[in-house]
Amino acid sequence: MRIRATVAAVSGALARTAQLLVVLALFAAAGGTLTGCGRVAEVRARQVADARARQVADAWDGSEAARAWRKGYHPTGEAVDLPEDAFHDISEKQAYEAQNFVLRGQLPVAPGKNGRVKWESGGSLTLPLVEARQAFEAVARGGNDGPHLTVTGAKLGEMALATSRGPATVPAWLFTLDGYDTPLKLAAVRPSKPLTSPVKPVAEGSGDALQLVRTGRDGRSVTVLSGHGACDDGPVVDVLETGGSVVLSASVVGTKEGPCTADLLLEMVTVKLNRPLGDRVLLDAFTGRPVPYERS
């Protein structure tokens, strides 16, 4: 699946290009040469990329950042559950995708109240609740005059959500939608604060180039969005697995002959793992940070 990049995605793709150039620069600085046989240069550049992945894994495995990651609440899936019968027609689906919601009714207030995240594997974490109004405003961002979904009320409940520590039950606002028998569920607690990585990015100031889309039900596959250009053959994502982390290294392959556009694209890439991800930290080799989950 290929989609055109948003402004943020374009920035990420540009950052990826810069990062790849830095890898080649590091290779040259180490005494390598990119002249002569292109295949030799490609192999040597790959060795540099592999060494970077190992550097990231070594920095994270057993680190304080990794311990904090495993104690925190870091969603790795969509923090929204649609009604069981969504959607009745294409216009309602378009309204959801455009974030066109209207409120006709009162939303509850839960001042100062906390909620508890509970993991299937054991353990829990108490976090401040997000107000129903804030949760609603996070999804009701549409501004056009097209189709709308109507929210008539809400109550506090729970929902299941995939996290870095496995499946969890989290507090959720259950929004009543006009015309639907089951609610729209939105997670009512925010993720834990981002962690300070024990390793610096390849290029200072580079963005999060990879975005997490989903992990497989059995934990043995990971799907990410990776940026690339319209003039190449698409992204490739390599994986390094250790006991404490899974490091993903993204690059682009091939070039196309003839004229092409300057579009920057995002493509879904699924990586197969040797064993379930579990509570291992999923990392981007170039940024040196956990791969962020983003709503696609």
Image: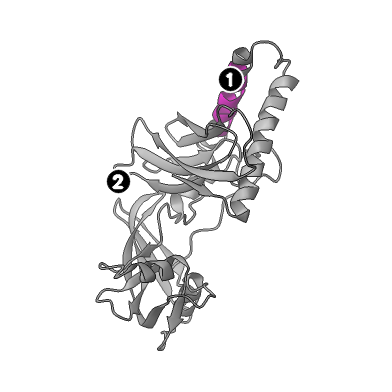
Placement of 175 over or under 186, stated as above or below? below
Query: In the rendered structure, which amino acid carries the disc numbered 2?
Result: Arg
x%, y% of residue 248? 50, 35
**Is residue 219 or residue 137 the one in the foreground?**
137
Q: Residue 27, percent across and down? A: 69, 21
- Foreground residue among 199 and 260: 260
Image quarter (top left, top right, bottom left or bottom right) of the N terminus? top left
Tell me which secondary structure the magenta stretch mostly adopts. Answer: helix
Q: Is residue 51 magenta?
A: yes
Determine the secondary structure under disc 2.
loop
Q: Secondary structure at mark 1?
A: helix
Total of numbered circles in the picture? 2
* Residue in the image at 50% along x and 32% along y: 236
Residue extending furthest bottom?
A: 105
Residue at the disc numbered 1: 47
In the depicted view, which residue is nearer to us: 19 or 128? 19
Picture layout, residue 284 above or below residue 181:
above
Position of 227 relative to 127 (above/below): above
- Report the residue marked by disc 2: 217
